[in-house]
Amino acid sequence: MTRMPTYFISHGGGPWPWMPDWRAIFSNLEASFVQMVRDLPERPKAILMISGHWEDADFAVMSSAAPPMVYDYSGFPPHTFQIRYPAPGAPDLARRAADLIAAAGLPVRLDDRQGFDHGTFVPAYIMYPEADMPVFQVSLRQGYSPDEHLALGRALAPLRDEGVLIIGSGLSYHNLRLFGPGAKEPSEGFDRWLNAALAKAPPERTEAMQHWEEAPYARISHKEEDHLVPLFVALGAAETEAATRVYHDTGLFGGVTASSYRFG
Protein backbone atom coordinates (compact mmCIF):
# COMPACT_ATOMS: atom_id res chain seq x y z
CA MET A 1 0.00 0.00 0.00
CA THR A 2 1.03 3.62 -0.48
CA ARG A 3 2.23 5.43 2.62
CA MET A 4 -0.48 7.64 4.10
CA PRO A 5 0.20 11.21 5.22
CA THR A 6 -0.72 12.27 8.74
CA TYR A 7 -2.78 15.27 9.78
CA PHE A 8 -3.33 17.63 12.65
CA ILE A 9 -6.76 19.18 12.25
CA SER A 10 -8.68 21.89 14.02
CA HIS A 11 -12.05 20.17 14.40
CA GLY A 12 -14.25 23.21 15.00
CA GLY A 13 -16.85 23.89 17.68
CA GLY A 14 -19.16 21.25 19.10
CA PRO A 15 -21.50 19.34 16.75
CA TRP A 16 -21.35 22.09 14.11
CA PRO A 17 -22.33 20.06 11.01
CA TRP A 18 -25.79 19.46 12.50
CA MET A 19 -26.53 23.18 13.10
CA PRO A 20 -26.98 25.15 9.85
CA ASP A 21 -25.81 28.50 11.24
CA TRP A 22 -22.65 26.95 12.72
CA ARG A 23 -22.06 24.88 9.59
CA ALA A 24 -21.95 28.13 7.61
CA ILE A 25 -19.35 29.51 10.04
CA PHE A 26 -17.16 26.46 9.46
CA SER A 27 -17.60 26.28 5.68
CA ASN A 28 -13.85 26.64 5.08
CA LEU A 29 -13.12 23.89 7.60
CA GLU A 30 -15.69 21.63 5.96
CA ALA A 31 -14.09 22.24 2.57
CA SER A 32 -10.68 21.32 4.02
CA PHE A 33 -11.99 17.97 5.31
CA VAL A 34 -13.50 17.18 1.89
CA GLN A 35 -10.19 18.10 0.25
CA MET A 36 -8.28 15.87 2.67
CA VAL A 37 -10.10 12.85 1.26
CA ARG A 38 -9.43 13.96 -2.32
CA ASP A 39 -5.73 14.39 -1.59
CA LEU A 40 -5.17 10.91 -0.15
CA PRO A 41 -3.04 8.60 -2.31
CA GLU A 42 -5.70 5.88 -2.03
CA ARG A 43 -8.69 4.96 0.06
CA PRO A 44 -7.53 4.17 3.62
CA LYS A 45 -8.13 0.85 5.30
CA ALA A 46 -9.16 2.78 8.43
CA ILE A 47 -8.79 6.10 10.22
CA LEU A 48 -6.94 6.29 13.52
CA MET A 49 -8.04 9.43 15.35
CA ILE A 50 -6.25 10.92 18.36
CA SER A 51 -8.79 13.36 19.79
CA GLY A 52 -8.32 16.10 22.35
CA HIS A 53 -11.52 14.82 23.98
CA TRP A 54 -10.26 11.46 25.25
CA GLU A 55 -7.46 11.01 27.74
CA ASP A 56 -6.57 8.14 30.03
CA ALA A 57 -4.03 7.16 32.66
CA ASP A 58 -2.37 5.04 29.94
CA PHE A 59 -2.63 5.14 26.16
CA ALA A 60 -6.00 3.46 25.64
CA VAL A 61 -6.93 2.01 22.25
CA MET A 62 -10.59 1.78 21.18
CA SER A 63 -11.18 -1.86 20.30
CA SER A 64 -14.96 -2.14 19.85
CA ALA A 65 -16.27 -3.44 16.54
CA ALA A 66 -19.20 -1.01 16.81
CA PRO A 67 -18.20 1.99 18.94
CA PRO A 68 -21.05 3.92 20.61
CA MET A 69 -21.45 7.70 20.69
CA VAL A 70 -20.06 10.10 23.30
CA TYR A 71 -21.86 13.46 23.51
CA ASP A 72 -19.09 15.34 25.25
CA TYR A 73 -20.59 18.81 24.91
CA SER A 74 -23.31 20.84 26.57
CA GLY A 75 -25.61 23.73 25.76
CA PHE A 76 -26.40 22.57 22.23
CA PRO A 77 -29.86 21.78 20.75
CA PRO A 78 -31.53 18.54 21.84
CA HIS A 79 -31.24 16.97 18.39
CA THR A 80 -27.44 17.09 18.62
CA PHE A 81 -27.64 14.54 21.45
CA GLN A 82 -29.36 12.10 19.09
CA ILE A 83 -26.63 12.14 16.43
CA ARG A 84 -25.55 8.72 15.20
CA TYR A 85 -22.37 8.11 13.25
CA PRO A 86 -22.45 4.33 12.84
CA ALA A 87 -18.98 3.77 11.40
CA PRO A 88 -17.48 0.38 12.24
CA GLY A 89 -14.52 0.10 14.55
CA ALA A 90 -11.32 -1.72 13.66
CA PRO A 91 -10.59 -4.30 16.37
CA ASP A 92 -7.74 -6.03 14.52
CA LEU A 93 -6.01 -2.73 13.80
CA ALA A 94 -6.62 -1.66 17.40
CA ARG A 95 -4.71 -4.73 18.60
CA ARG A 96 -1.95 -4.00 16.08
CA ALA A 97 -1.72 -0.41 17.35
CA ALA A 98 -1.62 -1.57 20.97
CA ASP A 99 1.20 -4.00 20.15
CA LEU A 100 3.20 -1.21 18.50
CA ILE A 101 2.66 1.08 21.47
CA ALA A 102 3.69 -1.64 23.92
CA ALA A 103 6.79 -2.44 21.85
CA ALA A 104 7.83 1.21 22.22
CA GLY A 105 7.75 0.82 26.01
CA LEU A 106 4.68 3.00 26.48
CA PRO A 107 1.81 2.04 28.81
CA VAL A 108 -1.20 0.84 26.84
CA ARG A 109 -4.50 -0.97 27.23
CA LEU A 110 -7.41 -1.94 24.98
CA ASP A 111 -10.80 -0.34 25.68
CA ASP A 112 -13.86 -2.04 24.19
CA ARG A 113 -16.36 0.43 25.70
CA GLN A 114 -15.13 3.83 24.57
CA GLY A 115 -17.20 5.54 21.89
CA PHE A 116 -16.66 8.22 19.28
CA ASP A 117 -16.32 11.70 20.81
CA HIS A 118 -17.10 14.80 18.77
CA GLY A 119 -13.43 15.39 18.01
CA THR A 120 -13.72 12.16 16.02
CA PHE A 121 -17.26 11.85 14.69
CA VAL A 122 -17.51 15.46 13.46
CA PRO A 123 -14.57 15.36 11.00
CA ALA A 124 -15.25 11.71 10.15
CA TYR A 125 -18.84 12.57 9.20
CA ILE A 126 -17.70 15.29 6.79
CA MET A 127 -14.96 13.09 5.33
CA TYR A 128 -17.04 9.91 5.01
CA PRO A 129 -20.73 10.84 5.41
CA GLU A 130 -21.85 7.30 4.59
CA ALA A 131 -20.04 6.06 7.74
CA ASP A 132 -18.44 3.32 5.62
CA MET A 133 -14.86 3.93 6.77
CA PRO A 134 -13.64 2.01 9.85
CA VAL A 135 -12.60 4.41 12.60
CA PHE A 136 -10.82 3.86 15.90
CA GLN A 137 -9.16 6.09 18.46
CA VAL A 138 -6.11 6.16 20.69
CA SER A 139 -6.37 8.31 23.80
CA LEU A 140 -4.08 11.02 25.01
CA ARG A 141 -2.19 10.21 28.18
CA GLN A 142 -2.80 12.31 31.26
CA GLY A 143 -0.03 14.81 31.91
CA TYR A 144 0.20 15.75 28.20
CA SER A 145 3.95 15.07 27.98
CA PRO A 146 5.14 16.26 24.54
CA ASP A 147 7.88 13.61 24.56
CA GLU A 148 5.44 10.78 25.31
CA HIS A 149 3.02 11.87 22.60
CA LEU A 150 5.79 12.31 20.05
CA ALA A 151 6.90 8.79 21.02
CA LEU A 152 3.34 7.56 20.54
CA GLY A 153 3.37 8.96 17.02
CA ARG A 154 6.70 7.28 16.27
CA ALA A 155 5.32 3.98 17.56
CA LEU A 156 2.22 4.25 15.36
CA ALA A 157 4.14 5.28 12.23
CA PRO A 158 4.27 1.74 10.70
CA LEU A 159 0.47 1.85 10.38
CA ARG A 160 0.88 4.50 7.67
CA ASP A 161 2.30 1.78 5.39
CA GLU A 162 -0.61 -0.51 6.28
CA GLY A 163 -3.37 1.75 4.97
CA VAL A 164 -4.16 3.62 8.18
CA LEU A 165 -4.74 7.38 8.08
CA ILE A 166 -3.51 8.93 11.35
CA ILE A 167 -5.27 12.15 12.34
CA GLY A 168 -4.61 14.26 15.42
CA SER A 169 -7.87 16.10 16.08
CA GLY A 170 -7.79 19.19 18.28
CA LEU A 171 -7.69 22.94 17.75
CA SER A 172 -4.75 25.22 17.12
CA TYR A 173 -6.43 27.71 19.50
CA HIS A 174 -8.54 26.45 22.40
CA ASN A 175 -9.49 28.95 25.07
CA LEU A 176 -13.23 28.61 25.61
CA ARG A 177 -13.23 31.67 27.87
CA LEU A 178 -11.63 33.97 25.31
CA PHE A 179 -13.54 34.21 22.07
CA GLY A 180 -14.55 37.32 20.15
CA PRO A 181 -12.23 40.30 19.60
CA GLY A 182 -10.12 39.37 22.64
CA ALA A 183 -9.04 36.16 20.88
CA LYS A 184 -7.65 37.95 17.85
CA GLU A 185 -4.19 38.89 19.14
CA PRO A 186 -3.34 35.66 21.04
CA SER A 187 -4.71 33.28 18.39
CA GLU A 188 -2.96 35.17 15.58
CA GLY A 189 0.29 35.30 17.53
CA PHE A 190 0.30 31.63 18.46
CA ASP A 191 -0.78 30.61 14.96
CA ARG A 192 2.08 32.62 13.46
CA TRP A 193 4.56 30.86 15.76
CA LEU A 194 3.08 27.44 15.02
CA ASN A 195 3.27 27.92 11.27
CA ALA A 196 6.91 29.05 11.48
CA ALA A 197 7.84 26.25 13.89
CA LEU A 198 6.35 23.54 11.70
CA ALA A 199 8.23 24.93 8.69
CA LYS A 200 11.58 24.27 10.42
CA ALA A 201 13.83 21.35 9.53
CA PRO A 202 12.78 18.17 11.40
CA PRO A 203 15.14 18.19 14.41
CA GLU A 204 14.47 21.87 15.14
CA ARG A 205 10.76 21.37 14.52
CA THR A 206 10.51 18.57 17.06
CA GLU A 207 12.45 20.62 19.59
CA ALA A 208 10.12 23.58 19.06
CA MET A 209 7.11 21.38 19.86
CA GLN A 210 8.82 20.04 22.99
CA HIS A 211 9.14 23.64 24.18
CA TRP A 212 5.82 24.92 22.88
CA GLU A 213 5.05 26.65 26.20
CA GLU A 214 7.73 29.21 25.34
CA ALA A 215 5.79 30.31 22.24
CA PRO A 216 4.04 33.70 22.14
CA TYR A 217 0.60 33.51 23.79
CA ALA A 218 1.06 29.77 24.41
CA ARG A 219 -0.80 29.58 27.72
CA ILE A 220 -3.46 32.04 26.59
CA SER A 221 -4.15 29.96 23.50
CA HIS A 222 -3.98 26.67 25.41
CA LYS A 223 -4.71 27.03 29.11
CA GLU A 224 -4.80 23.24 29.02
CA GLU A 225 -3.10 21.67 26.03
CA ASP A 226 -5.49 18.78 25.39
CA HIS A 227 -6.34 20.23 21.96
CA LEU A 228 -2.70 20.83 21.00
CA VAL A 229 -1.23 17.47 22.06
CA PRO A 230 -2.80 15.55 19.12
CA LEU A 231 -0.42 17.57 16.94
CA PHE A 232 2.57 15.91 18.63
CA VAL A 233 1.26 12.46 17.70
CA ALA A 234 0.66 13.40 14.06
CA LEU A 235 4.14 14.94 13.91
CA GLY A 236 5.83 12.00 15.62
CA ALA A 237 4.34 9.63 13.05
CA ALA A 238 5.84 11.68 10.18
CA GLU A 239 8.76 13.31 11.96
CA THR A 240 11.08 13.79 8.99
CA GLU A 241 8.43 14.82 6.47
CA ALA A 242 7.37 18.27 5.34
CA ALA A 243 4.44 20.10 6.89
CA THR A 244 1.81 21.79 4.72
CA ARG A 245 -0.90 24.07 6.07
CA VAL A 246 -4.15 22.75 4.63
CA TYR A 247 -6.65 24.98 6.45
CA HIS A 248 -6.45 28.53 7.76
CA ASP A 249 -9.29 30.68 9.03
CA THR A 250 -9.35 34.10 10.66
CA GLY A 251 -12.15 35.81 12.53
CA LEU A 252 -13.97 32.69 13.71
CA PHE A 253 -16.49 33.65 16.40
CA GLY A 254 -15.41 37.25 16.04
CA GLY A 255 -11.65 36.83 16.42
CA VAL A 256 -10.18 33.31 16.39
CA THR A 257 -7.44 32.27 13.95
CA ALA A 258 -7.18 28.50 13.41
CA SER A 259 -5.11 26.18 11.20
CA SER A 260 -4.67 22.53 10.22
CA TYR A 261 -1.60 20.73 8.83
CA ARG A 262 -0.64 17.72 6.75
CA PHE A 263 2.68 15.91 7.25
CA GLY A 264 4.03 13.98 4.30
Image (cartoon, grey):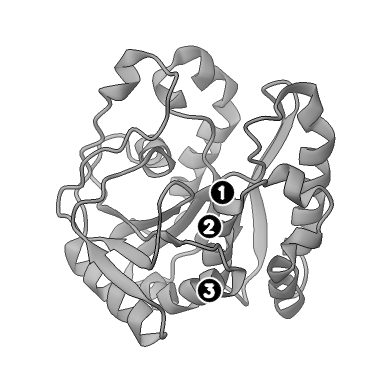
At a point 38% along the width and 35% down the height, the residue shown is: 72
Q: Which residue is mark 2?
A: 230
Q: Amino acid at mark 1?
A: His
Q: Position of residue 180 (x, y in %)?
A: 73, 22
> For this rendering, which residue is in front, 128 or 78?
78
Look at the picture and state if 26 lies above or below 130: above
Q: Quadrant of residue 187?
A: top right
Which residue appears at 48% of the width and 61% of the height? 142
Residue sitting nearer the eye, 264 or 116: 116
Is the C-beta separation of discs 3 and 1 under 8 Å? no
Relative placement, left or right, of 187 versus 164 is right
* Placement of 183 over or under 226, stated as above or below: above
Q: Dot 1: what SS? A: helix
Compute the Cα span from label 2 to label 3: 11 Å
Relative image position of residue 49 (x, y in whole percent): 40, 55
How far apart, in angstroms, are the residues tagged by discs 2 and 1?
A: 7 Å
Q: Sequence-wise, which precedes: disc 3 or disc 1? A: 3
* Residue type, mark 2 in image: Pro
Residue placed under numbered mark 1 in the picture:
227
Q: Which mark is residue 148?
A: 3
Where residue 157 sits in the image (x, y, percent)?
A: 44, 75
For the residues labelled 2 and 1, say whether their Cβ atoms are less than 8 Å apart.
yes
Q: Is residue 178 left or right of residue 48?
A: right
**Labelled disc at residue 125:** none
Which element is circle 2 on? helix
